[in-house]
Amino acid sequence: MKLKIAVGFALACMLATTAYAQKSAVQSIEEYRALLQDGNPADLFEAKGEGLWKQARGPKKASLEKCDLGKGPGVVKGVFLELPRYFADTDRVQDLESRLLTCMETLQGFNADEIAKTAFGRGEQVSVTALATWIAAESKGGKFQLSQAHPKERVSYEVGKRLFFQRAGPHDFSCASCHGQEGTRIRLQDLPKLTKNPGDGIGFAAWPAYRVSNGQMWGMQQRLNDCYRQQRFPYPGFGSDVTIALGTYLGVNSAGAVSVAPAIKR
């Protein structure tokens, strides 16, 4: 009897120690993230994006101040919280970055296809990321509410949902492999469950974001592209229907979540 009590006490101590260590690790990660928030380099990209919006550029020597991101020409505040959405002039669902390409082509005369094919972090891709960072910042603190009123918006959501759960590639991975359950993480990075609203400033509600580990500013297109890379899938095209559909699925699931973009990541 005494032996059973001693063993039980020892097991209880081990469990308590393990729980304490796990809690301490989580607390340490939160403290680390709090320190990162002090002086987010994304501020520099915001400033650059605002300047690019107002600057006359491209073959047509025009600014983007007449660009319609969903709330009328030139309106920026609040648009980020409703994208991706359907646009009648292109007859397709677009996210912020693909919509910016449309405006850069129609208003400024840039070649949208060429920019889409440019590697991340080079050429006009840098401009798109900076613009997206500033526009996202103009809606910081607002709540996501993506439309599902148009048939193509509903199709985009359903396609995104199927893509999220599609298992393929050499490791038989899907988006849900990492983001289909609660309470998981890789190293210092949480893996939120994205099949529902993960909470304020988490997942979809945190991008664009500055990546401390590589000193780069990433928009949602690059974030999704890198997820495919980690799954060992072929890279999707920039602004493709695939990445926009995934963005639609994640955005609709984030209804009511508060945007903290541009955020800062490890």
Image: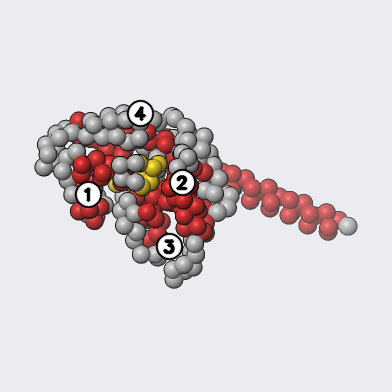
Q: Is residue 112 left or right of residue 226?
A: left
Which of label 3 and label 2 is nearer to you? 2
Residue 112 got which mark? 1
**Nearer-the-camera pick, 215 or 178:** 178
Q: Is residue 189 left or right of residue 215?
A: right
Q: Amino acid at mark 4?
A: Lys
Q: Earlier in the sequence, mark 1 or mark 4?
A: 4
**Nearer-the-camera pick, 12 or 213:** 213
* SS class, disc 1: helix
x and y percent of residue 54 in the render? 20, 30
Q: Earlier in the sequence, mark 3 or mark 4?
A: 4
- Distance between the Cα atoms at labels 1 and 3? 28 Å
Q: Earlier in the sequence, mark 2 or mark 4?
A: 4
Q: Earlier in the sequence, mark 1 or mark 3?
A: 1
x and y percent of residue 191 in the render? 50, 50
- Distance between the Cα atoms at labels 1 and 4? 24 Å
* SS class, disc 2: helix
Which of label 2 and label 4 is nearer to you? 2
Q: Amino acid at mark 1?
A: Ala
Q: Earlier in the sequence, mark 1 or mark 2?
A: 1
Q: Is residue 159 left or right of residue 225?
A: right
* SS class, disc 4: loop
x and y percent of residue 164 in the render? 49, 56
Disc 3 marks which residue?
Answer: 231
Q: Earlier in the sequence, mark 3 or mark 2?
A: 2
What is the quadrant of residue 196 in the picture?
Answer: top right
Disc 2 marks which residue?
Answer: 151
| Visible residue check, residue 198 | no
- Distance between the Cα atoms at labels 3 and 2? 30 Å
Residue drawn at x 43%, y 62% as measured from the top left: 231
Disc 4 marks which residue?
Answer: 77
Residue drawn at x 15%, y 35% as measured from the top left: 62
